[in-house]
């Protein structure tokens, strides 16, 4: 069995596979790439993303919601013996499909009220923020706390967490309502950057380029005046620059040599 996720949504596939044993291969998923779902006796027993097993149930549910919302990619089901399957969780496929549909519909129905995906937000102070009744929101807070500490947008968080931008915007809206994060304006971002560049620190600032590579460390601040080639600074920085003295070779007479004795 194989096909396109735009034609057969993931929750429908989970319902069909609840009576089968095998692996559902999902390919060409936006932000995720490849994901394998191991199904055994009506339960989802493992979720593997890029050969990494998602061990927490909240993480598995977030991935399934992301695939459902984005609705892009291909699937292929492979019947496999139980010996080939991974067993890291036990989630009833039918109940899981219903929850994925419910949460996906809730997110898409409120999408117009969510903050802009490019808006930057920052934690209001408490790194752990707070405990929330929704386990998925708590999981999101735990996974994104470090990003919110310095400031991040929904687009960056979606790429980092490998879930849909709509899910991140939904969580950000909940955190804004609780006062756990606050928007960070562009002017504030430039102000923080200017302060970092002006500060005297032994730690060099590395800049990430547009292609993802990290550039050379920026030069550290110094109070010394620029030096010209072939000069040296004597004493304090208030004294003038003088030419650098070089040691000249001393002329010495050639050593005396004895003339060879003739026959």
Image (cartoon, grey):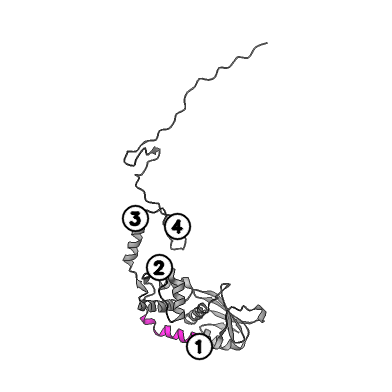
For the point 39% across and 74% down, which residue is it?
Answer: 117
Report crowding for label 3: few under 14, some 14 to 19, many 20 or more residues within 10 A (C-alpha): few
Q: Quadrant of the C terminus?
A: top right
Q: Secondary structure at mark 1?
A: helix
- Tell me which label, 2 or 1, sits earlier in the chain: 1
Q: Number of labelled discs?
A: 4
Marked residue nearer the N-terminal end (3 or 2): 2
How far is the residue under mark 1 from the one under mark 3?
Answer: 54 Å
Determine the CA span between mark 2 and mark 1: 34 Å
The kind of secondary structure the magenta stretch mainly shows is helix
Rounded to the nearest whole Å, what is the CA distance between mark 3 and mark 2? 21 Å
From the image, tell me which residue sits under label 3.
Answer: 198
User: For the residues carrying marks 2 and 1, which lies nearer the camera in this image?
Assistant: 2
Say whether residue 250 is visible: yes
Position of residue 84 measured from the top left corner of the image (x, y, whole percent): 65, 78
Nearer to us in this view, 114 or 134: 134
Q: Which residues, given as a range, are shown in magenta? A: 97-113
Residue with the mark numbered 2 = 149
Q: Which residue is mark 1?
A: 98
Q: Position of residue 125 (x, y in %)?
A: 37, 69
Q: Which residue is mark 4?
A: 215
Which quarter shows the N terminus? bottom right
């Amino acid at each position: 069995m194989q096909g396109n996720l735009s034609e057969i949504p993931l929750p429908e596939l989970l319902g069909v596979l609840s009576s089968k044993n095998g692996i559902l291969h999902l390919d060409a998923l936006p932000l995720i790439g490849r994901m394998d779902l191991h199904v055994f006796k009506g339960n989802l027993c493992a979720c593997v993303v890029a050969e990494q097993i998602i061990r927490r149930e909240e993480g598995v549910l977030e991935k399934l919601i992301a695939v459902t919302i984005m609705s892009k990619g291909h699937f292929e089901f492979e019947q496999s013996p139980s010996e080939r399957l991974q067993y890291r969780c036990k989630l009833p496929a039918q109940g899981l499909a219903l929850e994925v549909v419910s949460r996906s519909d809730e997110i898409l129905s409120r999408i117009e009220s969510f903050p802009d995906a490019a808006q930057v937000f920052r934690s209001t102070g408490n790194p752990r923020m707070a405990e929330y009744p929704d386990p998925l929101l708590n999981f999101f807070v735990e996974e994104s706390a470090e990003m919110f500490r310095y400031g991040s947008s929904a687009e960056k968080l979606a790429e980092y967490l490998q879930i849909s931008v709509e899910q991140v915007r939904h969580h950000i809206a909940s955190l804004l309502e609780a006062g756990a994060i606050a928007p960070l304006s562009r002017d504030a971002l430039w102000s923080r950057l200017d302060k970092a560049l002006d500060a005297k620190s032994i730690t060099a600032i590395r800049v990430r380029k547009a292609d993802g590579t990290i550039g050379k460390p920026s030069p550290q601040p110094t109070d010394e005046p620029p030096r010209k080639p072939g000069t040296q600074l004597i004493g304090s920085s208030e004294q003038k620059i003088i030419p650098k003295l070089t040691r000249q070779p001393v002329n010495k007479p050639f050593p005396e040599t004895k003339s060879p004795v003739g026959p």
